[in-house]
Amino acid sequence: MTLYRLKIERDVDAYNPRTEHDNVGTMVCWHGRYTLGDEQPDQSPTQYKYQLALDVAAERRAADDPGDASDSQWLYEDIDELEDAEYAAAVERAQALLNAHYVVLPLHLYDHSGITMSTSRFSCPWDSGQVGFIYVAKDKALEEWGHAHEPQKMTDEEFWAERLTYEVKEYDLYLTGECYGYVLEKGIEVKKTYPNGRVEREVEWEHVDSCWGFMTDDMNELRAMVSDGLPDGARPLLEQMDWTSVGEWIYADETTEEAA
């Protein structure tokens, strides 16, 4: 018979999905204390977005695409030299050009006993605020993600925004420490005979497997993730697993199975 025990633990060395994954979106952040996202520019958010608009115009000119030619004539190389009225008009037109060629979502951060990030605003105005944005060019989104799977329910832009939101959600799981792994051991019964003739049977535990990098804040999803890597005889242990058992060994007699 084989007896298993299982421990679910927080992954204290979890990988950063912004550096370890090939993300489609680019996450740009400005914060005085934290290094967040993919880029932390020296430019202001307005200057950064304006540069994106300049890049769009340059690409279209290089491709001899007249689509935005008339709109791109007002793009100044340095908006900081403009008067207030010109500055506001240039920024507004740049934003219109971005809206036509990019999907851009805001990034909001809540900072209180830890940090959490979302594309939606948090309810507390004192400990939260916008720290940046995540964006993707529409032609890149189409190449990577294709068209909306259910066009009758959402547009392509809405579908791509949903995919960007998923990237932010994954990063938020990393920021909030919702990263887990498991250790699986099997018990080997050992018979010990003492000089006085007393015999005791004990179980010694031997490492079988471990796996890390599960990111989720849903216990049912975590069970499913862990289950995929376990042998059949160890899976019943998952029925006992909940958030209170994280970091503790889970034992159960019913997890025994005949040895192969």
Image (cartoon, rainbow, N blue to C red):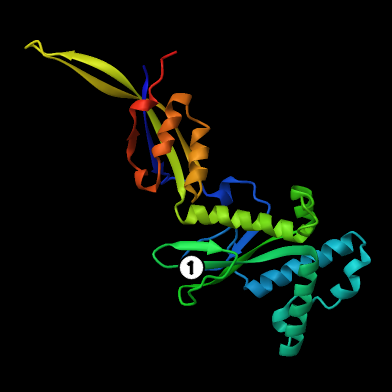
Q: Which residue is mark 1?
A: 110
Residue, x 63% and y 58% (percent of image)?
165
96 shown above or below 224: below
**Viewer-proximal residue, 191 or 108?**
191
Q: Position of residue 41 (x, y in %)?
A: 60, 66
Residue, x 33% and y 26% (percent of image)?
253
What is the count of numbered marks?
Answer: 1
**Viewer-proximal residue, 125 or 84?**
125
The quarter holding residue 28 reads bottom right
Instruction: Please identify the residue farthest to the front as the structure is shown.
Output: 254
Residue, x 87% and y 63% (percent of image)?
60
Residue, x 45% and y 67% (percent of image)?
111
Q: Position of residue 45 (x, y in %)?
A: 63, 72
178 shown above or below 125: above
Mark 1, residues whose alpha carbon is within 10 Å: few (<14), some, or many (≥20)? Answer: many
107 shown above or below 226: below
Q: Position of residue 131 (x, y in %)?
A: 56, 69
185 shown above or below 13: above
Q: Quadrant of the N terminus?
A: top left
The quarter holding residue 241 reads top left
Q: Position of residue 122 (x, y in %)?
A: 52, 70
**Viewer-proximal residue, 151 or 91?**
151
Q: Quadrant of the C terminus?
A: top left
In the image, 111: left or right of 78? left
Give the amino acid type for the residue marked by disc 1 in the picture. Tyr
The quarter holding residue 168 reads bottom right
Judging from the image, what secondary structure is the residue with disc 1 in? strand
